[in-house]
Amino acid sequence: MFRILKREMLTPNICKMVVSAPRIAKSALPGQFLIVLAGEKGERIPLTISDYDREAGTVTIVTQLIGASSAAIIAKEEGEFFRDVVGPLGNPSAFVGMSDEQIKGQRYMFIAGGLGTAPVYPQAKWLHDRGVAVDVIIGARTKDLLIYTEELGSACDNLYLCTDDGSVGFHGVGTACLEDLVSKGKEYTQAVAIGPMIMMKFATLTCKRLGIPIDVSLNMLMVDGTGMCGACRVTVAGKTKFACVDGPEFNGYDVDFDEAMRRLGQYRAEEAVEKAKYVK
Amino acid sequence: MAERIPRVPVREQDPKVRAHNFEEVCYGYNLEEATREASRCLHCKNPRCVTACPVAVKIPEFIAKVKEGDIAGAAAVIAEDSSLPAVCGRVCPQESQCEGSCVLGVKGEPVAIGKLERFVADFSAGETMSPSGVVSDDPTTGHKVAIIGSGPAGLACASDLAKWGHDVTIFEALHKAGGVLEYGIPEFRLPKDAVLKREIESVKRLGVKIETDVIIGRTVTIDSLMDNEGFEAVFVGTGAGLPKFMGIPGENLNGVFSANEFLTRNNLMKAFREDYLTPIHAGKKCCVVGGGNVAMDAARTALRLGADTTIVYRRTEVELPARKEEVHHAKEEGIDFQMLTNPVEIIGDENGWVKALKCIRMELGEPDESGRRSPVPIPGSEFEIPTETVIMALGTAPNPLIVNTTDGLQATRKGGLVADEEGRTTREGIFAGGDAVTGAATVILAMGAGRKAAKAIDDYLKNK
């Protein structure tokens, strides 16, 4: 059992939880994910790690209300327990394995969208703490839906906010903001996009145009998260990969985003039935 | 010579009824039936059945106890060699092991050893089984052993080590113990709460601790278990969990699943139950590719979820690797078998969902290295089976996670850990057995390997 030490609603639909999981906190690295099972009858939900504290033995997860199982996670109160938290799963971000030599002089740009903003935080912090140049763009539909602005503000050199409705920051999507920055002379050696699949697809197209390499974090459907079920299959550079063990981060240029988006909808009909049952 | 008693038939759920539910197919023997069947055993001086059993259960000895009506005594005899009799009685391929070597089988039908084993286990369920000849309150040795994986190999290894007084902890990656017994084998063949849970509880009663939600190689490494947590020996029984795909066009279409995914959703995650949230998609028409037990399990699960189901296999029925009983049950339930048929492509509709499975007819050619005649395609015989889902049940390979995160371990080209007959790997103090070494095989072979390794670990700890 894994105790929820802190719970905070970041938006009406997005919930941040700090969970006691000492073994996981000890091994977690930026880019990896967890699987959370709220209760006996729920699903195993993959969530990218949004922070970890080795000394306190905690990991932070951020969940968005989508279906019945995410609702069951969010419904938990402070002091209550998750039945299961498993991880850390997947490979850490590419930069974690790089030497100081390799990473020195790099200029990172993180493009964060929606829920994907939270897992950008441990990555930006990791690089920023090592003196690597890091800029971050956070995009959301409107001002009230922006999350992690304070945390990320302290974990990068320049934080750019953008909203579709222009309620704060740059008026437009994150990729337009990136193009704007580059046109004004900003230079980046590596981009990382985390967010909805469609956003990562367009971030990749933009980066291709700008000649910036980009990594994306694929949030595919999964059951076990250890390479056993193959539900998370994606085509990368023409080959089938499992997002859980081969990823979750891949070179965006190589990812078949259309297939990935289609595969994400594989259980949509069944999920709607479950959600209806749960809501009722 | 008196007329021999015929093999006592076992009662089963009506195929028409069971095709729509997940309750157990076979009801097993009652006391009277079991005693009658037990009386058929000839008690051979050199019992070939024992030699043919991978864990060498003293078969004639336990059957004699059944005949006398001493079921607790029979259970104690089995417990000396097997910690999972209710499981083995249900899922072992008896026809190629104990029953396959029974003398009675030469002219007639062998003793129903599997059904008797199952009867003994079920009849004495709930009672604490203290194996005869084993002192259950052995002084503890103080040696700590870590077992990785709570499937058949790990449970068998852990049971023996605990009986010998070692301090044993099993680490399980999933949220429930049992490995393939939990995620792979369906409820209608191996009831989870009534049978599996009970047997795992009895392993725990031997003193074995089970920690779920720990992925060795990710949550913690073997090196860390040995260096920081005081484990002196490790047994790797992580099975063969990676699914294989065919590499044909269309395999990433929506509606194509590995048997692992399909079965895990239904078994571990209980998608068939209304009160669980897990989604599963069998469609109205389902094709399962493969001919092993997993293919049968997937097909019969899809059928129960409401799909008209076809099994596609490239060789003939004679070569089907599945247990005979499973094939028989599948046919009774109305599964269509397309033999000498091999998929060449999965065809999708305009939305990227499966529409049909394109196959080619095969014929048997010359025998290959394995001695089996290898199937070769008949040119121009391609045809399509309209279907909404395709489940790939082509076998599984070991997960490379442990090898990749532990210094000094070696794997073969096929991914199995390199280990000797007793389970010693290429690194001192680390042992392995079951599918993690051999690639996908059977529950009982994994248990046999677990027991051999337990012996080797015990020797290692004593001589350290």
Image: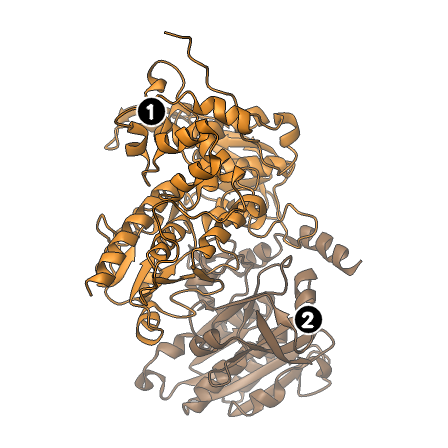
Chain colours: A brown, B orange
Give the label, 1 or 2, closer to the camera: 1
Between B400 and A159, the one nearer to me in the picture: B400
Identity of the residue drawn at 38% across and 66% down: B217
**SS assignment at label 2:** helix
Between B332 and B281, the one nearer to me in the picture: B332
Image location (x, y in percent) of residue B360: 44, 29
Q: In which quarter of the image is the C terminus of chain B?
A: bottom left
Same chain for the residues at labels 1 and 2, yes or no? no
Q: Is residue B203 above or below residue A134?
A: above
Residue under circle 1?
Answer: B43
Q: In which quarter of the image is residue B143?
A: bottom left
Q: Which amino acid does the dot numbered 2 rest on?
A: Ile
> What's the mark number on residue B284?
none
Q: In which quarter of the image is residue A82?
A: bottom right
Residue under circle 2?
Answer: A74
Residue A122 showing in the rendered view = yes
Please give the chain letter of the residue carrying mark 2: A
- Left or right position of B274 against B177: right
**SS assignment at label 1:** loop
Image location (x, y in percent) of residue B309: 57, 32
Identity of the residue drawn at 59% across and 78% down: A117
Q: Quadrant of the N terminus of chain B?
A: top left
Please give the chain letter of the residue carrying mark 1: B
Q: Is residue A236 above or below residue B380?
A: below
